[in-house]
Amino acid sequence: MRILILGGDGYLGWPTAMNLTASGHQVAVADNYLRRNICREENSEALFNVSNLHDRVKIWEKISGHKIDVYIGDLCEWDFISTLFTQTKPEVVIHYAEQPSAPYSMLNRNAATLTIKNNISVTTNVIFAVKEYTPDAHIIKLGTMGEYGTPNIDIEEGWINIEHKGRKQKFLYPRQAGSLYHTTKVMDTDLLWFYVRMWDLKVTDLMQGPVYGLHTDENQGNEDLFPFFNYDELFGTVVNRFIVQAVAGYPLTVYGKGGQTRGYLDIRDTLQCVKLSMENPAQKGELKIFNQFVETFSVNQLADKVQKTGKIFNLDVQVKSLPNPRKEAEDHYYNPAHTGLLDLGLRPHYLTDDALAQMMETVLKYKNNIKKSSIFRGVKWQ
C-alpha cells in the first residue's frame, strides 16, 4: 500500500516508517522538525543525537534495501500539504504530526498558542487534503488515553451506549482532558467525527497510553536507527524518564502521592497496533476507536520496578515525592477497556524486568550525555 506518515521524524513516526517498509509497503514521511526545534529552544534535547530524516533514510536503505521518500515542510501550510498529497497519493495516512507534550502545552502562553495552532491546523488540513485528493484513503490518527481523563466509571472503547428517559443512543465517550495538549486531541476526535459524518471519511482513532522503549525489530544492532529518547520533564514519557534518572543518580520524580494510574505500552506494540489498524480499516462513514495500551500501572508501581532493575546494575535508585505541579487526581478509579486490538491479534510485550534491564543497559552507554538540569523544572498547571 502507499502510506503517508505525517510526523515521520518523531519518536513513533520513524520506527513506524521502518516497520512498514520492512513489511513491503511504499512509505513516504513528512515532517518540519518542530519537535527538534522546540527541544533546542527549551534546552531539552534527547539523550543522544538523532540524524536528520535524509541521513536516517540512507542508513535504513543501506541496511535493509527499503526506500522511504522524505518531504520536509510545514503541514499547517496548504501549499505544502497539497503538493504532498498530489505526489504521494496515499491509500493510508498515519497522523502523528502534532506537538505531543502536555507539560510543554502548559508552559506559557506562547507554548499554548503553538500547540493549538499546530495541532488543530494540521488535522484540519489533513481532512481537507484527503477529501480533495484521496477521498478513499484511510486516516489513522494517534490519539491519547488522556482524552478520557480519570472518570469515576469504567472507560469504554471510544463509545458509550446511553439510555435516558426511555430512549437509547450511542455517543462518543465523554472526554475530560487534563492538559491543553490532551484537549487539542479531543478537538481532533471531534473534528474527525464531524467530517466522517459529513463527508463519509474512513478514520481510525487510536487512544494510546504513554509509550516506552527504544528497541524495535528494525533497529536491533544499529543505534543509528534509534528514535528520539527524551528524558526531560517536557518531552520524556515517565518510564523513559525514570530509567535515565536511575542511571544519573537523580531521585525518581514521583509527583504527589504517586497513585496516578495510566495504561502503558512498549514501542513495539505501537507498531503492531498501527499495522493492525491498517489491515482492518474503517469503512466509509465510520470512526473506529481503539484504546491502545497493554498494562496499567501507578507511578509508584513504575518507580518500584525501576528501583528493582537498578539493583541489577548496582545502582542506588532513590525515590523522591515532589509537590505535584499538575492539576490531576492522584488517587482515582481507573478501569479502561482495551479488547479491540487484542481481538485483532495484538501480541503484547509486557514491562518485564528483562525489558527494563535492556533499556537501562542502553542508557548506561550514554550516561555522560545526561544533563541533570533538564530532568525537572516544575512546570506548573496553575
Image (tube, helix red, strand yellow):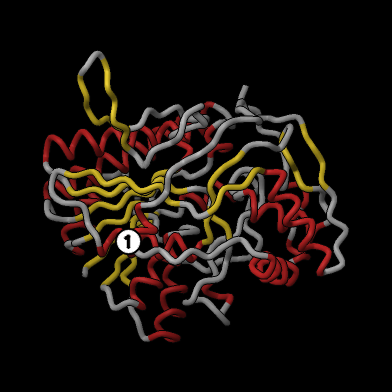
Residue found 29% across the figure and 52% down from its top? 140
Whether residue 112 appears in this view of the structure is no
Residue found 52% across the figure and 26% down from its top? 109
Rendering quarter of residue 285:
top left
Q: Is residue 375 left or right of residue 153?
A: right
Q: Is residue 118 above or below residue 49?
A: above
Which quadrant would the C terminus be assigned to in this image? top right
Q: Is residue 293 left or right of residue 222?
A: left
Q: Residue furthest top?
A: 165
User: Which residue, given by chain and number where applicable, does mark 1 sit on?
Assistant: 344
From the viewer's side, name the closer residue of 163 and 143.
163
**Mark 1 falls on what kind of element?**
helix
Residue found 73% across the figure and 33% down from its top? 257
Residue 207: % across, % down? 40, 45
Q: Is residue 113 left or right of residue 108?
A: left
Residue 129: % across, % down? 18, 48
Report how many numbered discs are placed on residues in the image: 1
Residue 326: % across, % down? 63, 29
Q: Is residue 264 above or below residue 50?
A: above
Q: Is residue 215 left or right of residue 270?
A: right
Whether residue 231 appears in this view of the structure is yes
Residue found 71% across the figure and 66% down from its top? 360
Q: Residue furthest front?
A: 166
Residue 46: % across, % down? 62, 57
